[in-house]
Amino acid sequence: MSTTNLYYAAACQTSFDCPTDRKQIAQRTTRMCEMIEHTIIGYEPFFDVRLLVFPEFAHAAPVFDSVKKLSDRLAIPIPNEHTDRYVAIAKKYGCYIQTGTFLEIDDSYPNVVFNTTVLIGPDGILSKYRKVNPWIPWEIHSSPHDIADYKDEPFPVVDTEIGKLGVAICYDWLIPESIRQIAFNGAEVIIRVSAYMDPWGATEPMDWWTLFNRARAAENTVYVVASNQGATLKGYPPFSWPGGSMVVDYDGRILAQADPGEGEKIVVAPINIDSLRIERKRRVGHDMLAHLRSEIHPYINKQYLAPGESDKPLTGDSIRQRIADAKKRLGENS
């Protein structure tokens, strides 16, 4: 597929109050559509913004303590009326949109709620990514890992005119194997849709947000476009949300970053897919994908966190028990 040599990506952070009912999603969609138009039109004299990325929980968050409550109050199928609006705006401007996450229900997987983001382009929905590593024990939505005979690609990568795009959600980025799988699936730009809270946010002394965004970019030779929540503590208790949305190049350089702190913010930075491809082809040193000695790392073939029971809804207690069992396996393997 032909590729646009140079374009700009926008990391767009939102600041909504935490929704408690799916009826509240529409006003969030309206605001994000406004942000898309403002960004494309406002920056047009300076930058050709083709990719716009929104944070985790921009539509809905897992604020209830049971799968049933999430299903009854907040979860929706995909596609839906909101993705239809994003498709229309992507077609109008020829842009690509990585949506903020939805809580998703799917008739193919009863008793399950997924945390899902959708990549949308001018021709419609291009991929659907379901969070593989929920932030346990607090998040009680399911991982594709826990579904017996899961039939969809867990790490989709889409070949588009602006490059090969993959995505992962928030805590996925602390599991290097997940991001590396996306890279091995061919991604050139890996999008981070995130709701990263303090004290692991975008400021010292921890600054995990910057640390992992830069590390994953460099170790996989990919661009990273990372959008983080800018919600207030009052709007999204019990955590405060540091924002700091950023774009990082394939050597781990920060190309643009929003000042840390709550609130709506948008930063844009250049993506040059041709440059990335030339460097991947040219380099002999620091090509961490080609240098991977996979056979000497047998740990990945052992079981740690076992899949859940796919015929039963997740609970906080069942997740904690699976974590305890995984700790026992770690002790047995050490």
Image (spheres, rainbow, N blue to C red):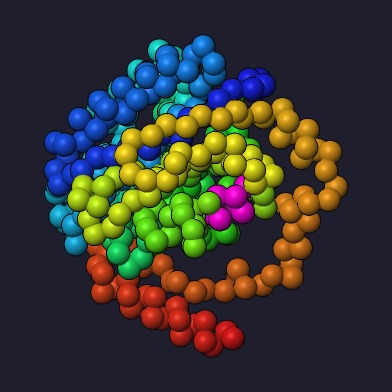
Residue visible at 41% across and 67% down in the picture: 307
Residue visible at 37% across and 46% down in the picture: 261
What is the quadrant of the C terminus in the image?
Answer: bottom right
197 relative to 179 in the view: left or right: left
**Is 264 located above or below residue 149 in the figure?**
above
Residue 236: image location, x then y, percent:
24, 51
175 relative to 73 in the view: left or right: right
Foreground of the two, 109 or 242: 242
**Is 144 located above or below residue 52 in the figure?**
below
* Majority secondary structure of magenta residues: helix
**Is 171 located above or below residue 272 in the figure?**
below
Task: Please state the extent of the stretch shown in magenta in the rendering.
Answer: 211-217
**Is 13 located above or below residue 43 in the figure?**
below
Residue 135 visible somewhere in the drawing = yes
137 relative to 272 in the view: left or right: left
Residue visible at 69% across and 70% down in the picture: 297
Residue visible at 43% across and 71% down in the picture: 306
Quarter of the view holding residue 264: top left
Residue 116 visible somewhere in the drawing = no
Residue 280: image location, x then y, percent:
76, 40
What is the quadrant of the N terminus in the image?
Answer: top right
Residue 22 belongs to magenta span? no
Residue 149: image location, x then y, percent:
43, 56
Quarter of the view holding residue 3: top right
Residue 314: image location, x then y, percent:
27, 64
Foreground of the two, 109 or 80: 80
